[in-house]
Amino acid sequence: MPEKKKIPKSAVSRLSLYLREVTRLEKGGKGKISSTELGDYTDLTDAQVRKDLSYFGQFGTSGAGYDIPSLKEAIRKILGKDKIWPIVLVGAGNIGSALLRYPGFKNQGFVIKEAFDADRKKVGKRCGDVVVKDIKNISDIKKNGSIRIAIIAVPENSAQDVANTLVKVGIRSILNFAPVVLRVNSGVTVSNIDLSTELENFSFILSSQEAP
Amino acid sequence: MPEKKKIPKSAVSRLSLYLREVTRLEKGGKGKISSTELGDYTDLTDAQVRKDLSYFGQFGTSGAGYDIPSLKEAIRKILGKDKIWPIVLVGAGNIGSALLRYPGFKNQGFVIKEAFDADRKKVGKRCGDVVVKDIKNISDIKKNGSIRIAIIAVPENSAQDVANTLVKVGIRSILNFAPVVLRVNSGVTVSNIDLSTELENFSFILSSQEAP
DNA sequence: CACTGTGAACCCGTTCACAGCA
DNA sequence: TGCTGTGAACGGGTTCACAGTG
């Protein structure tokens, strides 16, 4: 019976941070790093760094810290960054087309292979490396290898329909920019990026502060 | 001595959700709602809904639930949405210019009043309702009322400099799209949106699942 | 009687502190 | 000696359960 220690979701997100810093430091020629120092770079405590890494294995050397190149490779493997991840994007409006042109993804191994939109005027346009297709043909993605990650950047009133379709054609993870709570089967992961919510956190804090 | 119960940051984010749903339901003509029902719409438990709202006051009626119009107004006021919030954006690249054209902000009371970029080619261009200015003139924003919220959408290597400058000219809240940990004085709030980190959560889950 | 508001119990992520190893 | 790895303590956010109210 395999040990089943639970890994906090937030620990996985912090792994991304560690990977980012360690990658940067490796380019700078640094060879080793302690949990304290890595914590300084990421604004976390040394204990948090060690605990997080310990969820995934033992990467350090007592008394010496972590070897940067091998820590980097270890985290890359854990996060699945030793592979290329094809992505489908739905909605080629403002945000969607910015994402299509955004070079940051490809550098990171995430490649938008297909883009769909319902708007006739957008269908057929080249954007970044792909041509926007009609959303009716979305089941095409079944042919294109096995895309399991999707980005939804459509208006809120069609987001749930799009999500349903995506799940039907095999998508397992959805990054959702539409301001709605998507209902999906368990087994499908949804992350929401809601710009208004982020800004509302700010306006809440600022409002509270000015009325002391 | 005023009561100082601590409000979880996450409760504020959920307030945004409640506001969104309640606004939508009001448009649909619905008059009252129970915590259970509001929880269904937001994928939360009824207890969570009631506890969250209780941090901010008493909005319901025993046995009857919450009156939608007045709950909406109450949350709007709490989140500071009874005001217009001017915003400055720095970095008019892919993502920055998409945000400038994004109509969702204005509807929500967040108005990008100024945009800056370091790139000569972008300075002077109209984008959305504003003209992109040279970042050297950033202290102009002091003249323009009192902007306290900023969005950073510049490359990672200049993000910290930009943040320093923004804080110096009075910014108190920063929404950061650059993949770096920004160092700011306490008193300044930073929220990060890191698309690669989001996608890495997905690739982690998908990788783990396929090797069972 | 239905549903809110809330203290208390619970759970889980973070922090602590130290044993153990290079 | 310096730093990792980790069980145990801690703390705070969530859930429970019920008293109280219209």
Image (cartoon, coloured by chain):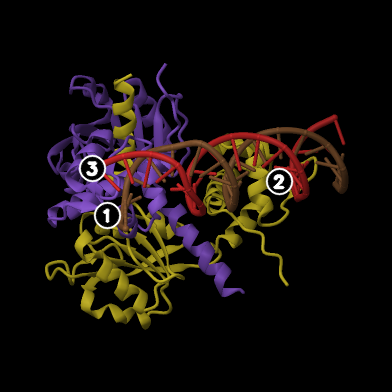
Chain colours: A yellow, B purple, C brown, D red
Of badges 1 and 3, the one in the foreground is 3
From the top left corner, tell me how far across and down residue B89 is, in percent. Answer: 26, 36
Location of mark 2 (residue) = A66
- SS state under label 2: strand
Q: Residues within 10 Å of mark 3 (few under 14, many from 20)?
A: many
- What amino acid does circle 2 point to? Tyr
Q: CA distance from mark 2 to mark 3?
A: 52 Å
Residue lying at the far bottom of the rendered structure: A143
Q: Position of residue B142 (x, y in %)?
A: 23, 20
Label 2 in the same subunit as label 1: yes
Location of residue A163 in the rendering, given as x and y in whole percent from the top left corner: 31, 69
Q: Chain of mark 3?
A: B
Q: Residues within 10 Å of mark 2 (few under 14, many from 20)?
A: many
Q: Amino acid at mark 3?
A: Leu
Could you tell me which residue is drawn at 62 percent across and 39 percent down? A38
Front residue of B62/A91: it is: B62
Q: Residue at x 23, y 74 (%)?
A: A133
